[in-house]
Amino acid sequence: MEKTIRRKDRMVTDIRQITDTVDRAKILHLGLLDGEFPYVVPLHYGYQYDSSSDKFTFYMHSAKDGHKLDLIRNNPNVCVQINTDVELASGGDVPCAYGSYFSSVIGQGKAVLVEDAEEKKKALDLLMKNQTGRSFEFNEKMIASVAVIKVEVGEYTCKARIKKPQ
């Protein structure tokens, strides 16, 4: 984790809290470059964290062709955004005092389309474990029928505003 954020009081640096956010969220927003405008797509994901390099590797699955894959092939620089625990923080009668409780992770990396069947199998298993808590068996036909996107993220931030117990 190398980037900093403006609201230092909301910055999360404890890797257990960061991986907890990544574990509990189920949708990753993948930001791609599409000419002069960004293109953001929500995707289910799986991941692994390497503590020795402080890097997350995110895996997403996709149809084998389409706009998202064309954009990755054209420019692999991407942004990932994950959030969970989103809830309105009331400001009472003061509209400018309203906000949100949340926990989020944002990072940058390069997207790669995984071609190796064993890595695709591992990626799909990580995805299903994150989404369902279960492992599944994948046959060759299943693996061949989807594209797998891999994004290694070494620079990321985690930010949270946690609701205090009442």
Image: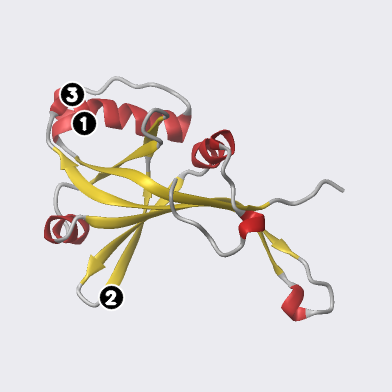
Q: Which residue is mark 3?
A: 118
Does residue 86 appear in this view? no
Q: Is residue 115 above or below residue 99?
A: above
- Picture quadrant where residue 148 is located: top left
Quadrant of the snapshot with the N terminus: top left
Image side of residue 6 versus residue 49, left or right? right
User: Label for residue 98?
Assistant: none
Which residue is labeled 1 in the image?
A: 120
User: What is the secondary structure assignment of the residue under circle 3?
Assistant: helix
Identify residue for label 2.
37
Are the two marked residues, 1 and 3, in contact with CB atoms closer than 8 angstroms? yes
Provide residue 115's location: percent of width, then percent of height.
Answer: 12, 36
Task: Look at 82% across and 46% down and name the residue there.
Answer: 165
Please state if 96 lies on the left or on the right of 37 as rendered: right
What is the CA distance from the residue labelled 1 to the residue labelled 3? Answer: 5 Å
The residue type indicated by label 3 comes to: Glu
Can residue 159 be spotted in the picture?
A: yes
Taking depth in this image into account, of 5 and 139 the one nearest to the observer is: 5
Question: Which secondary structure lies at badge 1?
Answer: helix
Q: Amino acid at mark 2?
A: Phe
Q: Amino acid at mark 1?
A: Lys
Image quadrant assignment for residue 78 = bottom left
Q: Earlier in the sequence, mark 2 or mark 3?
A: 2
Q: Residues within 10 Å of mark 2 (few under 14, many from 20)?
A: few
Quadrant in the picture for residue 149: top left
Compared to residue 83, the image places residue 133 above or below, namely: above
Scheme of image coloration: secondary structure
First of labels 2, 1 by sequence position: 2
Left/right of residue 68 with respect to residue 144 in the rendered view: right
Residue drawn 48% across and 51% down? 157
Q: Position of residue 151 (x, y in %)?
A: 28, 44
